[in-house]
Amino acid sequence: MRSNLEPRAPWGLKLAALLCVLFLHVPLLLIFLYAFTTEEKSYQFPPPAYTTKWFAVVWERQDIWDAIWLSVKIASIATAVALVLGTLAAAALWKSRFIGKDYISLLFILPIALPGIITGIALRSAFNVADIPFSMWTIILGHATFCIVVVFNNALARFRRLSGSMIEASMDLGADGFQTFRYVVLPQIGSALLAGGMLAFALSFDEVIVTTFTAGTGVDAKTLPIWMLDELIRPRQRPVTNVVAIFVMCVTFIPILAAYYLTRDAEHTAGAGK
Amino acid sequence: MFGRDFKMTLSNATVAVRFQDVSRHFGNVRAVDAVDLDIARGEFFAMLGPSGSGKTTCLRLIAGFEQPTSGHIEIFGETAEGVPPYRRAVNTVFQDYALFPHMNVLDNVAYGLMVKGVDRNQRLAKSEEALKLVALAGYGSRKPGQLSGGQRQRVALARALVNEPKVLLLDEPLGALDLKLREQMQVELKSLQRKLGITFIFVTHDQGEALSMADRVAIFNEGRIVQVGRPEDVYERPQTRFVADFVGSSNVLSPDFTKACGLGANWSSLRPEKIRVLSAKEKAARDVVSFPAQVTSVHYQGAITRINTRVKGDQVLSVSAPAAGLALGDKLTLAWPRSAMHVMGGEA
């Protein structure tokens, strides 16, 4: 609750905040608007008339469903890979102490700081050198590089809040390593993993650059974002892209929002145990 | 209970924990260095020492979180090396309690029984009983985060005791509590130990705590045990200057000064409360040593006043006396029975 004693923001600041919010969100509203326009060749404002027929068109087009299904598959597998590897890496760095530990954890985080184009080129040449044919799996590997970072960061932050003596306490009370992980560690890092996993999924789902570099050709190369890029170049049925964009927004927005609430709640309770 | 000779070896049937020439080195640091120790069954044993003296490492060696670099450890007659913590009949109360924040109090207490596969009804009943033992009946459904420090400490105690350990290890168990609660818990821990008859081994840097609770105390310094004995032994008859200094605040008298008091030229110790301030007309009795002294500082501490003085040469003496209205620089005469001085063996 905001108390009356708290100083109120001056109106100038409020205006700036409002403008900022508008700047961020008006373009998104336009996407919604043009999903319902009857004009299919240009973005005429205001739209001459409104229709919902584009939703039906999207429903009918197999290439869209293929693209969505491919993206979901890639994002799910990349996230699963990231969850396992990212958690293991975080656990290893949390528990052990060795020379160069800080550099190792920097190396883990680097892929997300690197421009996607660098990651993309590096992976493409690596796949070429290793003679790995480009396929859905090369895209998954490419996405996993930055998905791991998100999981790793989330898991490590939570691990650091876990007191080391809790693990010892569990062992002391008769639990072996597996039981300790299942009953003590996992419940406490679970929400961090879920949050990291959702972010990873969202990142993978709308990734374009790394995908372009690691994709082969044909149906296996056309993830949803790539399909959208292709579609923009075509002059016909523009609102179809907007309908798909709305779909993508929903798919990525819900997990990000959920991740936000999950980690926020955890912060509330995690400190209380100590 | 343990007779005068505190170094007596216990027969196998009465030993709870035995250390034979145990060392634990971390790189070049000898955290524990050639420790020999027998702890008796049913004993309340304290490991006392400054931080970094090796007492906590000893506790972790018993719990199984550390393995000895060399030497041999026995717990109830069985070799302990190589046995993981979860297979030892030993439980620990951790310094930070290490309660599981995502479980309620009852599940915390029942954890040890749960991982051992005790059925649900039985383990919950036993845990309720353990909570009753530490005066926390009815707190089972709370989360650890909703408890006070003292209550968490009791939960940690119940969580360890419900497993019916042969030895209970307590790592600075009262360190995080405030003074009042600490004193109360000292009494409760002691009576709990008497009631259960379990061997308690607790680590502390607080000499008052060790002296008031333990049957026997081991004093640690730099990875070694410097003295083991009943509280009155280590307090009245410290074997080294370190013990005299660390246990209570003893005056350590130089060999020269000891000689001047009519004893051999050795280091000796003298408790501040044994020294009296003589009034001007009072004459020292036989077997009483007396020296003129000058007050260097006065510390009022309520029931008593701590007076630091300088005597003959460089010898400094602390005196505990009822408030006497003394001021800095005052000259006075100090006296104490010669028998109050404890001559220590050798240099240390």
Image: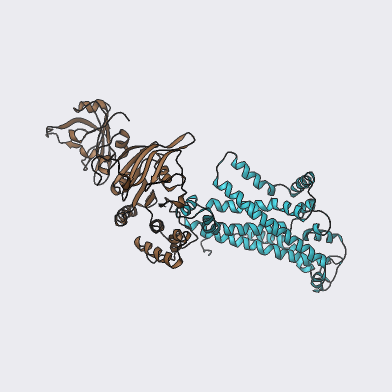
Name the residue located 41 percent from the left edge and 44 percent from the top edge: B56
Q: Is residue A151 above or below residue B6?
A: below
Kindly indicate the quadrant of the structure image that contains residue A227. Answer: bottom right
Name the residue located 56 percent from the left edge and 61 percent from the top edge: A265
Left or right relative to A120: residue B279: left
Left or right relative to A178: residue B12: left
Give the number of callouts. 0
Q: What color is chain A drawn in?
A: cyan
Left or right relative to A95: residue B110: left
Q: Nearer the viewer, residue B32 or A18?
A: B32
Left or right relative to B22: residue B335: left
Name the residue located 73 percent from the left edge and 60 percent from the top edge: A73
Quadrant in which the C terminus of chain B is drawn: top left
Q: Position of residue A198 (x, y in %)?
A: 65, 59
Kindly indicate the quadrant of the structure image that contains residue B324. Answer: top left
Q: Position of residue A229 (x, y in %)?
A: 81, 58
Q: Is residue A140 above or below residue A247?
A: above
Q: Is residue A26 above or below residue B167?
A: below
* Chain letter for the brown part: B
Kindly indicate the quadrant of the structure image that contains residue A208. Answer: bottom right
Q: Position of residue B81 (x, y in %)?
A: 44, 44
Q: Nearer the viewer, residue B273 or A201?
A: A201
